Amino acid sequence: MFRGVTQLSLDAKGRIAIPARYRGELVSKCSGHLIVTADPSKCLLVYPQPAWEPIEQRLNGLSSFNPKTRSLQRLLIGNAIDVEMDGAGRILVSPPLRRFAGLSKDVVLVGQGEKFELWDEGKWNQEIEDALSFSEEDMPPELNGFSL
Amino acid sequence: MFRGVTQLSLDAKGRIAIPARYRGELVSKCSGHLIVTADPSKCLLVYPQPAWEPIEQRLNGLSSFNPKTRSLQRLLIGNAIDVEMDGAGRILVSPPLRRFAGLSKDVVLVGQGEKFELWDEGKWNQEIEDALSFSEEDMPPELNGFSL
DNA sequence: GAACTTTTACCCACAATTCACCACTTTTAT
DNA sequence: ATAAAAGTGGTGAATTGTGGGTAAAAGTTC
């Protein structure tokens, strides 16, 4: 399971270095084969290839005649790119995805369980600020009895 | 169960020494393996790894399409970092978490049952001030009949 | 279709950072 | 008073992040 925030930077060629502490797990889970795609929150999602597979299949099973699900398919599957870690543990983020997420030099990689999120640093800080306003009324029913 | 307030200081490398009286319990509960993460109150949470695990699983099971729960996942899982106590019983608090909680030199570690909270000293004092204004109207229903 | 240009991928090397371990000082308890 | 334990700071070695350079692949133009 992936956790934690790391600040890192896109180099001149549009690559990011995956933090070393995740590399062992990534190699064992997917031999460095990752899927990068767009997220509705305007960040990027980074999945180990095996974890992505069932998501894509589920999306593909949706009706093509529902405009909403069709949009979701286009966003997620349409933007998905296969990438491989290079010898130095880096991956290349394609120009269209960089533009989508507004990534310039300073970005943050955020572990989220079985996947990562990749954010423009400013957007991420904003997102965290917003999360602080979480209150009891926002608690969904499935979190009944949940506490920290 | 952890109780009590301890003032301590972050050293130049961002480490804090866990008070010796907790170390025995921590070693037996988790061999010194702790999870540090962000709390909505702008302090940090410090969990023995086994106590954290069910919380993370519960969060991971939530819908990714509810913006509120998604924010909560990002705050808690995204900021969570694994740390190990060193030979001298210290843990390293990562720069992003220090910034989040506004920790400078003087901090306060507060035992809270199965976890700890780590506060900037000034913020903690403020928090205690605010707690003094607790009155009967603030009493939630599940505390009917409760008294000190 | 061939040659040239541009892009992409791969690999190697250096420099800064990080982490783990060690040593000293101070406090506390017997 | 002495000894053990706890707090504090320092050091060196290994690891990591970053940049560049080379070779192959793809694309374009004549």
Image (cartoon, coloured by chain):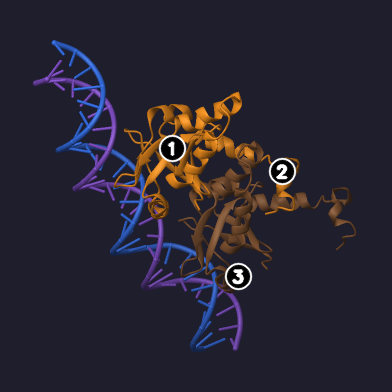
Chain colours: A orange, B brown, C purple, D blue
Please check whether the numbered discs 3 and 2 fall on a single chain: no
How far is mark 1 from mark 3, CA to CA?
43 Å
Q: Which residue is drawn at 66% across and 67% down?
A: B2
Tell me the SS state at disc 2.
loop
Q: In this view, does B3 lie to the left or right of C18?
A: right
How far is mark 3 from mark 2, CA to CA?
35 Å
Depth order, front residue of B125/A71: A71
How far is mark 1 from mark 2, CA to CA?
29 Å
> Can residue A110 be spotted in the picture?
no
Q: Do the residues labelled 1 and 3 touch (CB within 8 Å)?
A: no
Say which of marks 3 and 2 sits in front: 2
Residue matched to label 3: B22
Mark 3: few/some/many CA within 10 Å (<14, 14-19, 20+):
some
Label annotation for residue A36: 1
- The N terminus of chain B lies in quadrant: bottom right
**Residue B62 occupies quadrant:** top right
**Badge 1 or badge 2: first in the primary sequence:** 1
Relative vertical location of residue A133 with respect to residue A103 in this rendering, above or below? below
Residue matched to label 2: A140
Relative vertical location of residue A118 with respect to residue A95 in this rendering, above or below? below
Name which residue type carries label 2.
Answer: Pro
Tell me the SS state at disc 1.
strand
> Can residue B81 be spotted in the picture?
yes
Chain under callout 3: B
Depth order, front residue of B108/C8: C8
Q: Where is residue A74 in the image (x, y as percent from the top left)?
A: 50, 27
User: Which residue is outermost to the right?
Assistant: B145
Tell me the SS state at disc 3.
helix
Q: Where is residue D11 in the image (x, y as percent from the top left)?
A: 32, 64
Name which residue type carries label 3.
Answer: Tyr
- The C terminus of chain B lies in quadrant: bottom right
Q: Is residue A78 left or right of residue B19?
A: left
